[in-house]
Image: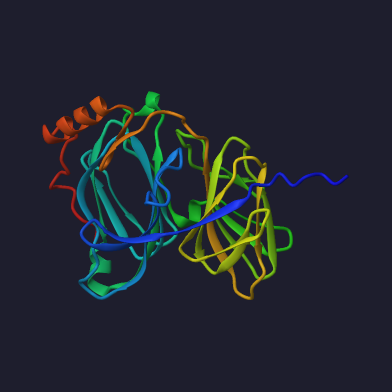
């Protein structure tokens, strides 16, 4: 008797298009009408890809965060980050910024001055990761990795490569510490490549196709760029095939569900409505601070 296949079955959701910040283009697979919740994740935004004329690049000016982490992963363009704690930095292609908002910060994310002047392609991702109740009000912190500092790995046959942002893949571990146990990996499968990747059995796992087309899960469900593939939770790994003649690029993201109540209001994510009201009051009273005028934009 053959052993039943316990690998997760995949479901596909197409990202909705929206405008965020000062008016930049976003592909958002969740939260949408089709998929509202994916514990422990709160949101995934694909910024672009888009070609921006000189002077037309837009970002997200000063805005607050409390109660979760944001992971910004840039593929093309240049972004500047500033906050109410005096932090300032720049992201260039391949860089990752992992910001734990915790008790609260005022944050600004905008194209760099140099990118504004010359224009070009802008493309990146921002993932919101919920924090457990014990960490909601922790001191804000940053973990920033330049492209060269992100661990990479390649399969023995050379057909599968991965950038390991969080978790472990192909025997390689990430350098970032996460408060909520998650994996975040950027895979590239060459034509006719097969990936059979182990994942923890208690994780919620999805893939988001960045470029190309592939087949996902035990039933080889097809998916293409700007589609999210959600795997079931009854298996111990995910299978991905590239039967085409072009490379397949996708993010593989998973995390251990928190199983806690979630109260959301814009950029505040807490466990109760009372905590949300307090977050609003703290923001209005200036208790999350202000971005200092002395924190100048990087040229």
Q: Is residue 290 left or right of residue 260?
A: left
Identify whether 203 is placed above or below 192.
above
Q: How many marks?
A: 0
Identify whether 85 is placed above or below 246.
above
Residue pictured at 55% horizontal, 45% vertical: 205
Q: Position of residue 29 (x, y in %)?
A: 42, 55
Query: Can residue 183 be seen by looking at this rendering?
Result: no
Q: Is residue 182 left or right of residue 244?
A: left
- Indicate the quadrant containing the N terminus: top left, top right, bottom left or bottom right: top right
The colouring scheme, among rainbow, by chain, secondary structure or one colour, is rainbow
Residue pictured at 60% horizontal, 65% vertical: 214
Residue placed most toward the observer, 59 or 219: 219
Q: Position of residue 30 (x, y in %)?
A: 40, 51
Residue placed most toward the observer, 106 or 227: 227
Q: Position of residue 280 (x, y in %)?
A: 18, 34
Query: Can residue 115 be seen by looking at this rendering?
Result: yes
Residue pictured at 62% horizontal, 38% vertical: 200
Q: Is residue 112 left or right of residue 221?
A: left
Q: Position of residue 145 (x, y in %)?
A: 43, 49
**Which of the 4 quarters of the picture holds residue 242?**
bottom right
Residue pictured at 37% horizontal, 60% vertical: 16
- Indicate the quadrant containing the C terminus: top left, top right, bottom left or bottom right: bottom left
């Amino acid at each position: 008797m053959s052993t039943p296949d316990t690998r997760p079955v995949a479901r596909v959701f197409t990202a909705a298009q929206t405008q965020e910040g000062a008016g930049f283009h976003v592909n958002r697979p969740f939260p949408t009408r089709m998929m509202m919740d994916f514990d422990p994740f709160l949101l995934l935004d694909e910024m672009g890809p888009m070609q921006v004329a000189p002077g037309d690049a837009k970002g997200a000016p000063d805005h607050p965060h409390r109660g979760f982490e944001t992971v910004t992963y840039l593929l093309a363009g240049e972004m500047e980050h500033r906050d109410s704690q005096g932090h300032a930095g720049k992201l260039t292609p391949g860089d990752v910024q992992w910001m734990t908002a915790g008790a609260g910060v005022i944050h600004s994310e905008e194209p760099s001055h140099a990118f504004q002047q010359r224009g070009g392609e802008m493309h990146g991702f921002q993932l919101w990761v919920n924090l457990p109740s014990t960490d909601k009000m922790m001191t804000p912190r940053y973990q920033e990795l330049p492209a060269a500092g992100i661990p990479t790995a390649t399969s023995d046959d050379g057909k599968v490569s991965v950038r390991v942002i969080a978790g472990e893949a192909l025997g390689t571990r990430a350098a970032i510490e996460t408060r909520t146990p998650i994996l975040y990996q950027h895979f590239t499968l060459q034509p006719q490549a097969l990936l059979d990747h182990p994942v923890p059995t208690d994780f919620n796992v999805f893939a988001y196709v960045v470029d190309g087309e592939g087949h996902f899960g035990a039933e080889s469900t097809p998916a293409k760029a700007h589609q999210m593939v959600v795997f079931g939770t009854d298996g111990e790994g995910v299978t991905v095939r590239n039967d085409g003649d072009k490379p397949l690029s996708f993010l593989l993201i998973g995390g251990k569900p928190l199983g806690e109540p979630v109260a959301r209001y814009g950029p505040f994510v807490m466990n109760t409505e009372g905590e949300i009201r307090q977050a609003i009051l703290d923001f209005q009273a200036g208790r999350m601070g202000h971005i200092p005028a002395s924190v100048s934009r990087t040229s």
